[in-house]
């Protein structure tokens, strides 16, 4: 009997199935509001101008060596990426208690962080330590932590469907009732899928409880720069926690803000109590990396490092990021206006109040089905839409379709 | 926040790269690094093939290439070509659609994914629960990869034999014959790490028969196809032979050495199954998402471009052959020097296998002598990377090895 003979079929990942269905759809009006990737107003992927420039620089550079990168990754990438998250003048960096591991995208950073925590956080053997993820959250969070060996993945209250906003009371309540030392996965900004972030004041309340109960903050930062258009503003929460003395992890992705989805550029920033702890952590992470992918890929990390470390290129990049963020803000504003103009029932303030790539429209599953089947507009069953899928050419059609869905489908 | 760190319990782990770091810090003028993981040329460093450089430049300026998320399992063209490279275009497994491939992050990524797939079989309805059999010796990281994937039952089969400075096939056959049915056996198709020791085709035929009879499942590692014998086909022969016998198998491939694409992490996991292919493929997708979501594109694009183009393919095969021939030449020269230095030892084991690695069966003191006293950095057991031996250091290396062996008589 074959070893693999009884392996069951795994369910397809919803968001990729959505894109596959979209591709097969022959309808000329079809719109893809599913996958979280940036699109131009022509609905095309966008290679950032600064990326094109640096790509060519790398290809023409004959001095580059082609060896394996160090296991922990390209040093100049790791340090510059951490500076982006924590601020170049971060006291923690000055105190030599910040380190990083170059990883395969945000997923890889979460993976290495999770594997480390399971083995070494707060003693050893954390298979029973609860890991809390927001309700709802990115659908892959659960699988990454579960596969790293954590047996207890629990939701914490986050989205209030009724008021279409943050359920702060529920969130704080779940923090209070969590066992001390539990691990909490926090979205640094531009929460996926709701687009709803805590305000600064709310973050302070969250941090208070977490400090009191020694809860571990594991930030997932996939949209820095993309949320408000400003890198520092988007990093406020992470930096606040560091200023409050938290040790923490921050899984950074450069897929969205560099448009480098395909080169898997990620960074796990580690903030520890002191340099000695940091060194021990990194030494164990090196071992974990070695038996996962051994060494990270060089292309994307080189590109990001050169960009972040060269003033003119850094400025150009920030500009490119702002271009993307601004287009999203424009689409948000226009969608809300059109829905209001159509007199679509309900309030639509959340479309402009929410931040980042995604909007939780509030459409229920039946209405979503209507959008997909009748209007060929592809969005997640949760009602999540990718604002980047909207363009000046399709926004009228989408607004009208939402109007139809809300008024004719209950 | 209390002053106590939540990372207090993390023990300091000495880096695997310590030997490399020591070498870098060593200021001795005659130092030689024979413990590296890359193929280096006569000049002492890694190179790209001119072809690879050209293709990379094309990729960098190609306006049609988009930076989109690739498929979870990688570029379909890449996995198709990588599969054909390993199994041969006309392999029955390909013809009968009994194979799928996954683009991975290097060979390590392929092994890790394969290990995760096997572990997931343990946890599902399947009755399989191990063990995995690894060669003795094997790289620590190989063992670590299986353990990290959650596979508890790991055993060893005898491979390297100190007496003969090669493989003792009798012992290996015995150990496999006595392994539990449905054990997974990790085998190097060619270029064993770290010893470089090889099996003949006759040996492989024997082993394959044992695996068929005892229902063992081969998990091949093919980290440097083409680099050992100079022939892509010959280096893959053990895998192809097992497929021809109807065995199911996994094969982890690396394109690091044979394309010089170390930094790019181009790997491939091949799965040849009898049944249930789509289900296993769907599980592989699920597992990839917990590891790296989807693989990096740059290196795979280069490999695909070469393997898709007949002219590029020829140029590439020539360069692989040249590397293999240089390694063989170095081995012959080393053997000759050692022979001239005299002593009771035999040196045929140096030239018998091809590829990067060679093992002298040195004990700890001898290894220490080489590293500390002669500044020649070698791996445990006296395994070494022959590509780092060149016309400038050949004499010094040969004399030092001779000294190491003589001093312990």
Image: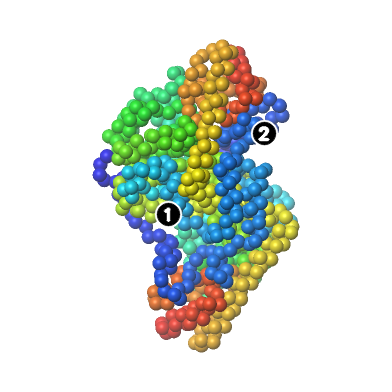
Q: CA distance from mark 1 to mark 2?
A: 40 Å
Residue drawn where x is 44% and y is 47% of the image: A80
Q: In this picture, is A67 found above or below B289?
A: below
- Chain of the residue where label 2 is placed in the rendered structure: A
Please give the label number shown on residue A23: 2
x and y percent of residue A245 in the render?
A: 30, 40
**Nearest to the observer: residue B165 or residue A164:** A164
Asked which secondary structure carries label 2, the reply is: helix
Numbered label attached to residue B313: none
Q: Residue at x 34, y 27 (%)?
A: A201
Q: Is residue A326 left or right of residue B306?
A: left
The chain under label 1 reads: A
Residue A170 placed where, x, y %? 37, 25
Residue at x 44% of width, y 25% of height: A159
Characterize the local packing of mark 2: few (<14), some (14-19) or many (20 or more) Cα atoms within 10 angstroms: few
Residue B300: x and y in percent read 62, 51
**Crowdedness of circle 1 by 10 Å Cα count: few (<14), some, many (20+)?**
many
For disc 1, the marked residue is A286
Question: Which of the 4 image quadrants contains residue B330?
Answer: bottom right
Q: Is residue A99 above or below residue A85?
A: below
Q: Position of residue B318 (x, y in %)?
A: 69, 66
Q: Is residue B177 visible?
A: no
Q: Residue furthest left?
A: B3
Establish if A401 lies above or below B19.
above
């Amino acid at each position: 009997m074959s070893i693999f003979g009884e392996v069951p079929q795994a369910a397809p990942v919803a968001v990729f199935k959505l894109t596959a269905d979209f591709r097969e759809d022959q309808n000329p009006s079809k719109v893809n509001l599913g996958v979280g990737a940036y699109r131009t107003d022509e609905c095309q992927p966008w290679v950032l101008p600064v990326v094109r420039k640096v790509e060519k620089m790398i290809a023409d550079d004959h001095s580059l060596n082609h060896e394996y990168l160090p296991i922990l990754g390209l040093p100049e990438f790791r340090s510059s990426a951490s500076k982006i998250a924590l601020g170049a003048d971060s006291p923690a960096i000055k105190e030599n208690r910040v380190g990083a591991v170059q990883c395969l995208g945000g997923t890889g950073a979460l993976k290495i962080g999770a594997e480390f925590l399971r083995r070494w956080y707060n003693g050893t053997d954390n298979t029973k330590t609860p890991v809390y993820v927001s309700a709802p959250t990115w659908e892959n969070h659960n699988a990454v932590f579960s596969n790293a060996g954590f047996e207890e993945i629990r939701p914490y209250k986050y989205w209030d469907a009724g008021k279409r906003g943050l359920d702060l009371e529920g969130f704080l309540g779940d923090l209070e009732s969590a066992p001390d030392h539990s691990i909490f996965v926090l979205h640094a900004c531009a929460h996926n899928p709701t687009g709803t972030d805590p305000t600064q004041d709310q973050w302070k309340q969250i941090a208070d409880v977490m400090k009191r109960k020694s809860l571990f903050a594991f930030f997932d930062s996939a949209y820095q720069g993309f949320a408000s258009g400003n890198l520092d503003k988007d990093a406020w929460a992470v930096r606040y926690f560091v200023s409050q003395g938290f040790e923490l992890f921050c899984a950074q992705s450069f897929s969205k803000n560099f448009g480098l989805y395909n080169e898997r550029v990620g960074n796990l920033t580690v903030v520890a109590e002191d340099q000695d702890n940091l060194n021990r952590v990194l030494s164990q992470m090196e071992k974990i990396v070695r038996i996962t992918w051994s060494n990270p890929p060089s292309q994307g990390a080189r590109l990001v490092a050169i960009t972040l470390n060269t003033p003119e290129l850094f400025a150009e990049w920030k500009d490119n990021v702002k271009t993307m963020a601004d287009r999203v803000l424009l689409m948000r504003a226009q969608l809300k206006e059109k829905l209001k103009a159509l007199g679509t029932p309900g309030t639509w303030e959340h479309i402009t109040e929410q931040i980042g790539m995604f909007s939780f429209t509030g459409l229920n599953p039946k209405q979503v089905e209507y959008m997909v089947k009748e209007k060929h507009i592809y969005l997640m069953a949760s009602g999540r839409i990718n604002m980047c899928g909207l363009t000046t050419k399709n926004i009228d059609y989408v607004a009208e379709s939402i109007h139809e869905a809300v008024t004719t489908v209950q | 926040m209390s002053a106590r760190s939540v990372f207090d319990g993390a023990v300091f782990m000495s880096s695997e790269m310590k030997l490399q770091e020591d070498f870098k810090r060593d200021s001795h003028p005659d130092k030689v690094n024979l413990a590296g993981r890359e193929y280096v040329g006569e000049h002492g460093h890694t190179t790209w093939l001119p072809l690879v450089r050209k293709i990379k430049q094309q990729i960098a300026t190609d306006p049609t290439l988009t930076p989109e998320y690739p498929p979870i399992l990688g570029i379909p063209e890449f996995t198709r070509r990588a599969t054909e490279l390993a199994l041969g275009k006309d392999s029955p497994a390909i013809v009968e659609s009994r194979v799928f491939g996954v683009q991975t992050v290097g060979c390590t990524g392929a092994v890790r994914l394969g290990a995760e797939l096997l572990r997931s079989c343990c946890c599902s309805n399947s009755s399989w629960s191990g063990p995995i059999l690894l060669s003795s010796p094997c790289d620590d990281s190989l063992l670590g990869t299986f353990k990290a994937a959650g596979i508890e039952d790991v055993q060893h089969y005898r491979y390297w034999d100190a007496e003969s400075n090669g493989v003792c096939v009798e012992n290996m056959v015995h150990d496999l014959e006595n392994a539990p049915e449905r054990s997974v056996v990790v085998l190097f198709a060619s270029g064993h790490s770290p010893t470089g020791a090889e099996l003949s085709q006759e040996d492989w035929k024997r082993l394959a028969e044992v695996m068929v009879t005892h229902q063992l499942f081969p998990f091949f590692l093919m980290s440097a196809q083409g680099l050992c014998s100079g022939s892509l086909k010959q280096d893959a022969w053990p895998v192809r032979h097992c497929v021809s016998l109807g065995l199911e198998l996994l094969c982890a491939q690396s394109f690091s050495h044979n394309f010089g694409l170390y930094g790019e992490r181009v790997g491939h996991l091949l799965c040849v199954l009898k049944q249930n292919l789509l289900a296993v493929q769907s599980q592989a997708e699920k597992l990839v998402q917990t590891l790296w979501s989807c693989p990096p594109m740059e290196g795979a694009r280069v490999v695909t471009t070469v393997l898709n183009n007949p002219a590029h393919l020829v140029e590439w095969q020539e360069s692989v052959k040249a590397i293999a021939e240089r390694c063989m030449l170095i081995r012959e020269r080393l053997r000759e020097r050692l022979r001239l230095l005299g002593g009771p030892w035999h040196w045929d084991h140096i030239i018998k296998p091809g590829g990067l690695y060679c093992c002298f069966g040195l004990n700890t003191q001898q290894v220490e002598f080489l590293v500390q006293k002669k500044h020649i950095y070698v791996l445990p057991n006296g395994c070494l990377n022959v590509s780092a031996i060149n016309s400038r250091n050949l004499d010094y290396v040969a004399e030092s090895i001779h000294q190491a062996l003589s001093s312990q008589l």
